[in-house]
Structures are given as structure tokens and as C-alpha cells.
Amino acid sequence: MTSEELGPVGQEVILDNERVRVWHIKLAPGETQGLHHHGLPYLVVAVSGARQVIHTLDGKKIDIVEETGDVVYRDLGQTHKLTNVGDTVYIGRIIELKAGFE
């Protein structure tokens, strides 16, 4: 995975101000959000949940299930891919916390 170029955290920025940046992400079953790095702490809000796999830069595979409405906090520093391995469309919001971290 190390030969891949880093892409964006999500597919579209829907809000960006001095305190937060909010990304939209939508993954069809089998679709992958490419390798990306989280340089800020962030929240993930599952608008429409799905079963997913996180593939980390160091080769780890982490199975996760995000139910619709789930909210998860994650620390900065993660570099990974995200693949929807479920049979439903995943829609999420990634909320990067900028205030006090940049």
C-alpha cells in the first residue's frame, strides 16, 4: 500500500471554517475510499451505516460495523483505506476538529 498516493479524507467538503471541516463520503457495496491520512482528530457520523474494512498503512485489516446514527471519535495520525464490504450503501460525515489542533 505504500506506493499509493494519498487522496482526500472524503469525497466532498460540505463545510469548512476555522473550527471544523466536514466531509461527505458515500461508498457503494464493494467500493473503496482510497488511501488517505487523517492529520486532525475527527468524528465519523454514519448517516447510512454499513459493514466496512479499514486497511491500515502497515497492513492491518480492521473489520467494523457502523450502524445508521453511530458516532465515533478517532485520533489524528491514521493513514488507511476504507472499503464497504456490506450489501448496503454507506453514507457518512467525517468531521475534522481544527480548533486547537492546527
Image (cartoon, grey):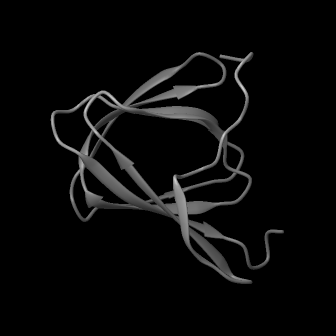
Image-based side of 68 in relation to 57, left or right:
left
- Measured as percent of width and height from the top left, residue 87 is found at 15, 34
Image-based side of 59 in relation to 66, left or right:
right
Residue at 74% of width from left, 79% of height from top? 99
Q: Relative to the observer, which residue lies in front, 85 or 42?
A: 85
Residue lying farthest right? 102
Q: Relative to the observer, which residue lies in front, 87 or 38?
A: 87
Residue lying farthest left? 87
Quarter containing the C terminus:
bottom right
- 66 above or below 71? above
Image-based side of 93 in relation to 39, left or right:
left
- 41 above or below 6? below
- Measured as percent of width and height from the top left, residue 84 is found at 32, 34
Quarter containing the N terminus:
top right
Residue at 79% of width from left, 77% of height from top? 100
Q: How many marks?
A: 0
Residue at 70% of width from left, 59% of height from top? 40
Image-based side of 53 in relation to 95, left or right:
left
Q: Relative to the observer, which residue lies in front, 69 or 10?
A: 10
- Measured as percent of width and height from the top left, residue 86 is found at 21, 32
